[in-house]
Amino acid sequence: MTGGSLLLTLRQIDICLGLYENEQLSDSGMTFAQVFLLNEIFSMDAPCVCSTELCERVGFARSSISRTLKELRKNGYVRMRMDQADNRKKRVLLTPKAYAARGSVQEYMENLNRCLVREIPEGSLEGIESTLQTILDNIQQETLRRPT
């Protein structure tokens, strides 16, 4: 595969992921970013998390995390409160609505992961993940902004 072919394949994957997300999440009223972020918060297994911790954990820009948290708050999945020790930090608290959606959020992420790795030999996944991380690192070195 040449570099041009790789770029085309990555673009096609991006488009197909978008279509998959739209089809699978249409009934939930949530976007992939919201489901992804909720899943990350669930996996942190803490009563509340700092939005800065989320940025560091997922590697997304603060503005992207803030925008997604704003939508989650608007839709009743999270509440925000100021950190008592440091008023500059915001704490994210999951609501009962988020906990009620936990099963479907985790199921969606598991189904997506299964779909992505179907028919890929277990021994190949580590190499693929490493190669994709190298591609991401390469492009991030060339950009001023981080992924949103």
Image: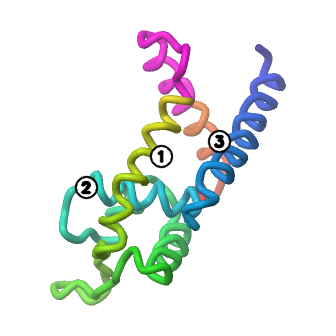
Circle 2: is it few (<14), some (14-19), or many (20+) Cα within 10 Å? some
Do the residues bearing badges 2 and 3 touch, measured as CB atoms within 8 Å?
no
How far apart marks 3 and 1 lie (CA) works out to: 28 Å
The residue depicted at 52 percent of the width and 24 percent of the height is 117
Quadrant hosting residue 73: bottom left
How far apart marks 2 and 3 lie (CA) works out to: 28 Å
Query: What residue range appears in magenta?
Result: 116-133
Question: Secondary structure beneath disc 3?
Answer: helix
The residue depicted at 76 percent of the width and 28 percent of the height is 9
Between 146 and 12, the residue placed more toward the observer is 12
The quadrant of the picture occupied by the C terminus is bottom right
Residue type of the residue flagged with mark 3: Ile
How far apart marks 1 and 2 lie (CA) works out to: 18 Å
Q: What mark, if any, has residue 139 been given in the picture?
A: 3
Label located before the other in sequence (2 or 3): 2
Label located before the other in sequence (1 or 2): 2
The quadrant of the picture occupied by the N terminus is top right
Q: Residue furthest left?
A: 85
Residue 78, placed above or below residue 15: below
Residue 83: x, y in percent?
A: 23, 84
The residue depicted at 49 percent of the width and 83 percent of the height is 74
Residue type of the residue flagged with mark 1: Tyr
**Residue occupied by mark 1:** 108
Residue 29, placed above or below residue 111: below
**Residue occupied by mark 2:** 44
